[in-house]
Amino acid sequence: MTKKLILASSSPRRQELLQQVNIPFSLRKQGFDESQITTRDPVEKVEQLAIRKGRSVPFEHPDEVILSADTVVSFQGKIFEKPGNQAEAAEMMRVLSGEVHEVYTGVMIRSQEDEVVIVERTAVEFWPLTEEEINWYVSTDEPYDKAGAYGIQSLGAMFVKQITGDYYNVVGLSISRVTRELRRFSVYPEKG
Ligand SMILES: Cc1cn([C@H]2C[C@H](O)[C@@H](COP(=O)(O)OP(=O)(O)OP(=O)(O)O)O2)c(=O)[nH]c1=O
């Protein structure tokens, strides 16, 4: 029997990626306070956050499958989440300029019978950025709801020299991997 996917994420990118591959879903808001997870290890961090976000959402029917996720940027032992203000966003861009950083997304998929947690890693290299570019970028709305203060899918594309790994993982959900896992939970793409 096909199960119903519940997306426990307010990220517009995750919603768009599921829509892109025709997987129907309903939204259910997750209510976990992210500041409670203090580990400095990026893999542990995204795993724990995906798990806590997922568990903060209750099942309402036995045929539901809940998907939750978390994305962070990691560079030289530091974790960059969403910047709190313009100065923080500019500082993140300065640190990432000309360097290779990692983007980790943790995903939890759970039904009442089973659960799985997956973590994907993508390496992203930035071109060296000028102060002018950084100041211009942080004056747009773009950095503030994104881990590492940039959106590879939007204006931030112009900073990216190359990536190694899944592009969609950087955007917030490794959609091919997730689609495969969801099949095991009896959640399938609809026909076009
Ligand atoms: C690096 C990068 C991140 N992001 C986004 C994906 C995530 O939405 C966001 C990281 O924040 P998250 O805390 O992972 O997600 P969220 O707060 O948007 O939503 P929720 O907690 O309800 O699931 O950064 C991009 O859109 N593009 C990028 O290039």
Image (cartoon, grey):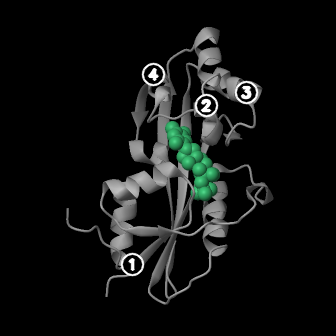
Q: State the residue position of label 4.
A: 158
**Precedes in sequence: disc 1 or disc 4:** 4
Q: Residues within 10 Å of mark 4 (few under 14, many from 20)?
A: few
- Distance in Å between CA atoms under marks 1 and 3: 41 Å
Q: Quadrant of the N terminus?
A: bottom left
Give the image location of residue 39, x and y in percent.
75, 54
Amino acid type, mark 4: Met
Q: Which residue is at 66% across, 34% downward?
A: 76
- Residue 135 visible in rendering: yes
Q: Nearer the viewer, mark 1 or mark 2?
A: 2
Amino acid type, mark 1: Phe
- Distance in Å between CA atoms under marks 1 and 2: 37 Å
Badge number at residue 86? 3
Q: Nearer the viewer, mark 2 or mark 3?
A: 2
Q: Nearer the viewer, mark 4 or mark 2?
A: 2
Left or right, 149 with reference to 22: right
Q: Secondary structure at mark 2?
A: loop
- Residue 71 visible in rendering: no
Q: State the residue position of label 1.
A: 185
61 or 127: nearer the eye?
A: 61
- The yes-or-no answer for disc 2 within 8 Å of ligand 1 is no
Left or right, 147 with reference to 26: right
Badge number at residue 141? 2
Q: Secondary structure at mark 1?
A: loop
User: Which of the 4 image quadrants contains residue 183?
Assistant: bottom left
Amino acid type, mark 3: Gln
Q: Which residue is at 73% across, 57% downward?
A: 34
- Distance in Å between CA atoms under marks 4 and 2: 16 Å
